[in-house]
Amino acid sequence: TKSELKDVKKFTDAHYAAPNKSMYGIARGRNVFVIHLESFQQFLIDKKVNGKEVTPFLNSIYHGNNTYAFDNFFHQVGQGKTSDAENMLETSTYGLSQGSLFATLGSDNTFQAAPAILNQRAGYTSAVFHGNVTSFWNRNNVYKNMGYQYFFDASYYDTSGDKSTGYGLKDKLLFNDSIKYLEQLQQPFYAKYITVTNHFPYDLDSEDEDPNFKTVDTGDKSVDNYFVTAHYLDQSLKEFFTYLKKTGLYNKSIFVIYGDHYGISDSENKKLAPVLGINSDKWNDFDDAQLQRVPLMFLIPNSGNHGHIINTYGGEIDVLPTLMHLLGVSSKRYIQFGTDLFSSQHDQVVAFRNQDFVTPTYTSLSGVVYNNKTGKKAKLDKKQQTQIKKDGNKVNKELSLSDSLNTKNLLRFYHPKGFKSINASKYNYSNGLD
Ligand code: GP9
Ligand code: MN
């Protein structure tokens, strides 16, 4: 009801973080490419195996002069995996404690999401490029409710025979075969690319393997193959960027590049540990939690070489307000649980979906608090105990208010200034062939 909406609004207003003046609007008017790196963890960045970088192209972006890259950025997904990441990135509200919000609520809920906001505030055209079928994660319905104008799913590409793996069109083909549609989009556009090849079980046809890249031998097939498909994903991006640079689109765009969630599960981490140079004998929950870091990079080509690697702690919930401020669109009037990562008021307590949380100093897992520096259980004085308690309460409150907002569809009562509600029936994603 409306009083429940009030509670949510009171919380998000109280936690609003004002933009950093030196960053506000630095990408104004640029096309936006959101590049979803499937199952891609931060440890892949700068990782070498058998003397070779796994992802040389992404590493060059990570260290680039016009890239703002975060190295303490965490995924926050629950059972909705990819769909939870998409939901957080484009609505700055959390996924659900169980199941996928896209699948369970996405057909009927009101969304105030990136494609609609950017269209209404700044004239952006919006599109998703993805090599799987429309119905996966209920995307065909959710995207309409988010105001996506176009969804180029599997039916728009030739996915026959060896052109696909388990979750659809191979990444190199997705980037290449989508160009004919991308070229038709009115600028400025907001275009999301969801890759799939680096997805469990990390199968790749031998014809797609780089003969110069030899992976590790851990005795765990998915750990070994993870590096192979990540390397393939990296090559697919390099090819796409070659095209973008050639056409000049590159310099007119901002790229949001992120990993959606872990690729190696907690149960496999002990096999991975030696590859990362960590002794797996003493492996514990703390170590698992540290591996939930995923990349987040904002690449703004030709923007004055102010890029650098930033140690601020944050998570997927924070991307939307951060991006909006880079584009010069204020986020203040919306209900968003995340805050601008560049703001001095950004809150560095990162909530996991199960109420665990990470701060720059501590990692709290099922009520056990670890010291980030030592990886051991923290000895807390009174003051520190009070702080941790406060942080934990905030995490719980934030998650439960987000759940209240979404499970009760409260945004249907919320009318931020100028926001025109979405009419899903306006959109038709069929390619006319089926
Ligand atoms: C499927 C892809 C994978 O289309 O996005 O989703 P996931 O299994 O990672 O949630
Ligand atoms: Mn995923």
Image (cartoon, grey):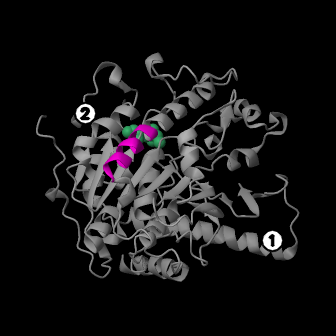
Q: Is residue 342 left or right of residue 30?
A: right
Q: Residues within 10 Å of mark 1 (few under 14, many from 20)?
A: few
Q: Is residue 185 placed above or below 402 in the rendered structure? A: above
Give the magenta part as a residue range. 238-248
* Magenta region, main secondary structure: helix
Q: Nearer the viewer, residue 309 or 36?
A: 309
Q: Is residue 174 left or right of residue 267?
A: left
Considering only order in the chain, which callout, 2 or 1, is on the residue closer to the N terminus? 2
Quadrant of the drawing holding the N terminus: bottom left
Quadrant of the drawing holding the C terminus: top left
The reply to whether residue 27 is in sight is yes
Where residue 417 sits: x, y (%)? Answer: 30, 82
Q: Nearer the viewer, residue 385 or 217?
A: 217
Q: Is residue 246 magenta?
A: yes
Residue 25 picture quarter: bottom left
Q: Residue at x 68, y 60 (%)?
A: 358
According to the picture, the residue beneath numbered tag 2 turns out to be 157
| Amino acid at dot 1 | Gln
Q: Is residue 40 magenta?
A: no
* Some atom of ligand 1 lies within 8 Å of the CB belonging to the residue at label 2: no
| Amino acid at dot 2 | Tyr
Q: Residues within 10 Å of mark 2 (few under 14, many from 20)?
A: some
Residue 108 picture quarter: bottom left
Where residue 379 sits: x, y (%)? Answer: 88, 63
Q: Residue at x 72, y 64 (%)?
A: 360
According to the picture, the residue beneath numbered tag 1 turns out to be 385
Which residue is situated farthest in the top direction here? Answer: 206
